[in-house]
Amino acid sequence: MGKLIGILTAGGDTPGLNAAIRAIGKAAIGVYGMEVIGFRDGFRGLMENRFIDLDSKALSGILTVGGTILGTSRDKPHKMQVGSKIMDMTDVIVDNYHKHHLDALICLGGGGTQKNAYHLHKHGLNIITLPKTIDNDVAGTDVTFGFDTALGIATEAIDRLHSTAHSHHRIIVVEIMGHRAGWLALGAGVSGGADVILIPEIPYDTDVVVESILQRSRAGKNFSIVAIAEGSESKNIHTLRLDLEKKLKETKDLSEQEKIKNDMKDINSLHANNTIRLAKKLEEITGLESRVTILGHLQRGGSPSAADRLLATRLGTAAARLVHEGQFGIMVASKGKKAVPVPLEKIVGKKKTVPLHHPWIESARFVGTCMGDNLKG
Ligand code: F6P
């Protein structure tokens, strides 16, 4: 009998997940004579033993479909909500894996999924992962699938915001996803020609942003597009956060720790309205009317781009080959034109943020984009 593979998709959905499921399945069944099942809703489906057969029929017609046919969740094997309790369900998951006589489990997900999958690998499961997320922040791979599609959507949004901002002489502050990494806002900001791009990697100075908008006004351009990554923060907030993190590390006093944690919560809740506050401030100081557009989950919806379909197909078919070869405890990464196995232990817990001298940042500065700091191109 051929090998049996289980697949699950975990974390936020992204365009390209179905293309990857299809690629794994078609290669596993068609080339290696394996069988494939899919667990529903991430690690929870594996824990609750909810699954479907991924036969040729189920794999057909899904290449271009957005989301994931398996459903997804952010559940963690070792910290799962069960009723009103948070429980470690690792043993149940390990048991279910063995009850199915799985030869491998392929987990499609972002940074959190890599961690959870590695946890299961350490409990003896044959794990392979694929890197997916619109945030493009998974370490060890050049790129993640989902990013290119979201980049296209965010760029088109900036394109469209230009004409309305221009017509009304407004500042439009557009918030772009990306969690704590600036890839999406930077990529879309550069390709959409945003006048200001703010990313978490470069804490911004509001005065510098204001001055760049006023300079545009003085040059006769009475509108501006500010592309802000959802994880961006001002220099002041950034310094406060670093300070608290440092204090938390240093203190052994439990009540002091509690106090610092509460202060951190305050900063986080302040962050929830960061984009709106920034737009208000820019309006107050520049006198230009401001509007906010939060792109939100629009960036994760719909059909994958051609580049994401190609990437997901490349990585998915490589994953089937790696199961055949018996290589486990790895993520299938994209490096140049190749799909290469990277040991999970090397990438888990690491985040790929934008390097400060990345060519996209340098080019943005060279075309006169304000990056929220005082550096110029
Ligand atoms: O990781 C993908 C992502 O879309 C992030 O960009 C964003 O911060 C987060 O997920 C939103 O999560 P949720 O869909 O759970 O609201």
Image (spheres, rainbow, N blue to C red):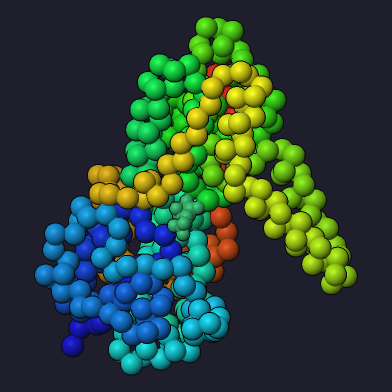
Q: Residue at x 72, y 43 (%)?
A: 237
Instruction: Please state if 17 lies on the left or on the right of 346 as rendered.
Output: left
> The C terminus lies in which quarter of the figure?
top right
Residue 69 x/y as whole percent: 25, 65
Q: Residue at x 77, y 47 (%)?
A: 240
Tell me: residue 162, above or below residue 258: above
Instruction: Please state if 166 lies on the left or on the right of 236 as rendered.
Output: left
Residue 87 x/y as whole percent: 54, 84
Tell me: residue 42, above or below residue 142: below
Q: Is residue 338 visible?
A: no
Instruction: Please state if 162 lies on the left or on the right of 270 as rendered.
Output: left
Q: Is residue 84 visible?
A: yes
Q: Which one is nearer the viewer's eye here, 11 or 297?
A: 297
Q: Residue at x 43, y 64 (%)?
A: 11
Residue 242 x/y as whole percent: 76, 50
Q: Which one is nearer the viewer's eye here, 335 or 177?
A: 177
* Residue at the left extreme of this rendering: 57
Q: Residue at x 37, y 81 (%)?
A: 46
Residue 272 x/y as whole percent: 59, 49
> The N terminus lies in which quarter of the figure?
bottom left
Hey, which quadrant is residue 32 in on the image? bottom left
